[in-house]
Amino acid sequence: MVRMTRSKTFQAYLPNCHRTYSCIHCRAHLANHDELISKSFQGSQGRAYLFNSVVNVGCGPAEERVLLTGLHAVADIYCENCKTTLGWKYVSMRHILGRKM
């Protein structure tokens, strides 16, 4: 009897030649090291990274949230593969208000 397992497929694979950042739970590729802007952010649960662009993530609804630096419009981001919440991203106020500004 042969047991077949379903392999995980991600929307995007990043080149192996670069250092990559991945989901801590399922190892889905998230960003190349070249896309890292800063490691100087502090989140509520520890150090946070700021990236220029990421792959294999979904985005929750936009909302206003009080952060260490004040009130900001943000949306949670999560791994598309395992649905683990990864952090949040800044969004514009028009997403909160539901109209063009």
Image (tube, rainbow, N blue to C red):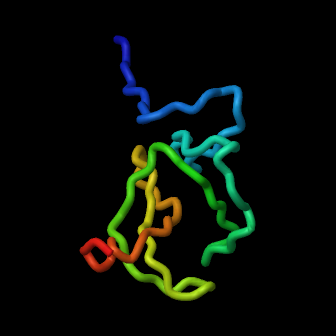
- Image height check: is 24 above or below 97? above
- Image height check: is 26 above or below 66? above
Q: Residue at x 36, y 71 (%)?
A: 62
- Image height check: is 3 above or below 6? above
* Of 50 and 25, the residue lying toward us: 50
Q: Residue furthest left?
A: 99
Q: Residue furthest right?
A: 40
Q: Quadrant of residue 61?
A: bottom left
Q: Residue at x 37, y 27 (%)?
A: 6
Quadrant location of the N terminus in the rendered image: top left
- Image height check: is 43 above or below 20? below
Q: Residue at x 63, y 60 (%)?
A: 50
Residue 57 position in % (x across, y down) = 44, 50
Residue 17 position in % (x across, y down) = 70, 26
Quadrant location of the C terminus in the rendered image: bottom left
Residue 77 position in % (x across, y down) = 45, 60
- Number of numbered discs overlaid on the protein picture: 0
Q: Residue furthest front?
A: 101
Does residue 101 appear to the left or right of 7 in the view shown?
left
* Of 47 and 39, the residue lying toward us: 39
Q: Residue at x 55, y 48 (%)?
A: 23
Residue 85 position in % (x across, y down) = 47, 61
